[in-house]
Amino acid sequence: MESTLGLEIIEVVEQAAIASAKWMGKGEKNTADEVAVEAMRERMNKIHMRGRIVIGEGERDDAPMLYIGEEVGICTQEDAKNVCNPEELIEIDIAVDPCEGTNLVAYGQNGSMAVLAISEKGGLFAAPDFYMKKLAAPPAAKGHVDINKSATENLQILGDCLERSVEELVVVVMDRPRHKELIQEIRAAGARVRLISDGDVSAAISCGFAGTNIHALMGIGAAPEGVISAAAMRCLGGHFQGQLIYDPEVVKTGLIGESRDGNLARLKEMGIEDPDRVYTDSELASGETVLFAACGITPGTLMEGVRFFHGGARTQSLVISSQSQTARFVDTIHIQEQPKYIELK
Ligand code: VTB
């Protein structure tokens, strides 16, 4: 994959984050999302690449931009052969979430970000708009914890792998009625729970870095976000497993289709033979090359949020590449007009 892509996608997530951050705390989650989508798409279309959205804003009928199947990048144009070099003409798949945590932005809360993952064609699992049971944990616990085990067992294993007692572990869980028993179990096992209202991508990736004081993500969130999390965790060597959830009874709240049978039929139609299959990070992001980029909209565990100043903005992003085996934190000052001053810290 084109090596400059890693640099260009930083700007893609930065532009989306800046656009969305202007709507921080305004109580309008749809606008915070729309502007991020627009900005992300505009910047993406300036890149010399031949991209196809595999995880996006929804089906073409419901989403005008960054819908599943949309082609993005200069090299998707008809005259691409004249303007792009052969390497840029290789098809790539892109998973986007321009505003991950729209509510967080709308209410000015921590943990939202603009995020995307890229791989070669077929390298990212085109997850349906379903829910996913997720288990994320640090690299030291990779392959030792298991989504099929109970939370109690996994906490014991996690403690052993991280050489800490269970009491010293922090687990992030989304604050939803469906997690009532899970939360009780984690607390009873002795670990501490950090409840979040939204934004489980940030929580999953935080498990990949020591020092975040987040040791696991457990529970059910959205499947597309699961694939994006898996892409990052695969590059970081962290643990990530996901299992699609198709039963509305299990999810309890949110939009998940009409019935269990209807959802099962939909999965079958999509070619998913075993609906209960557990996917690992390298199955969800199976491509040889995987790139991940995120930019904080509001402040988070890993990144600062967007900070505006007279004439510009400052952002913090994270770019992870399987090819160069790097995780780069990028601190950028965006000079839009002649600023009165540029703060260094
Ligand atoms: C999940 C989670 C996301 O929204 O999609 C959640 O993965 C929605 O869950 O990170 P509910 O339908 O249960 O409300 C986020 O938190 C934000 O997009």
Image: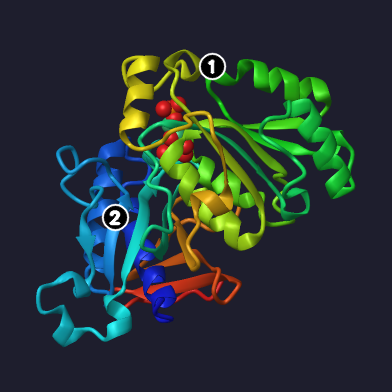
In the rendered image, the quadrant that contains the N terminus is bottom left
For image coordinates 89% across by 38% down, the residue present is: 165
Q: Measured from the top left, where is residue 52 in percent x and y? A: 27, 59
Q: Which residue is mark 2?
A: 53
Query: Where on the picture, by quarter, is residue 338?
Result: bottom left
Mark 1: amino acid:
Pro
In the image, residue 125 above or below residue 250? below
Query: SS at mark 2?
Result: strand
- Nearest the camera: 343 or 280? 280
Quarter of the rendered structure image containing ligand 1: top left
Q: Residue at x 43, y 18 (%)?
A: 253
Element under disc 1: helix
Could you tell me the amino acid type at mark 2? Ile
Quarter where residue 156 is shown:
top right
The answer to whether residue 105 is above or below residue 19 is above
The circle drawn on residue 264 is none
User: Could you tell whether 324 is left or right of 107 in the image?
Assistant: right
Q: Is residue 294 left or right of residue 214?
A: left
Question: What x and y, as percent, mark residue 183?
Answer: 67, 22
Image side of residue 328 versus residue 186, left or right: left
Q: Return the x and y of residue 14 as percentages of the image width and height.
A: 38, 64
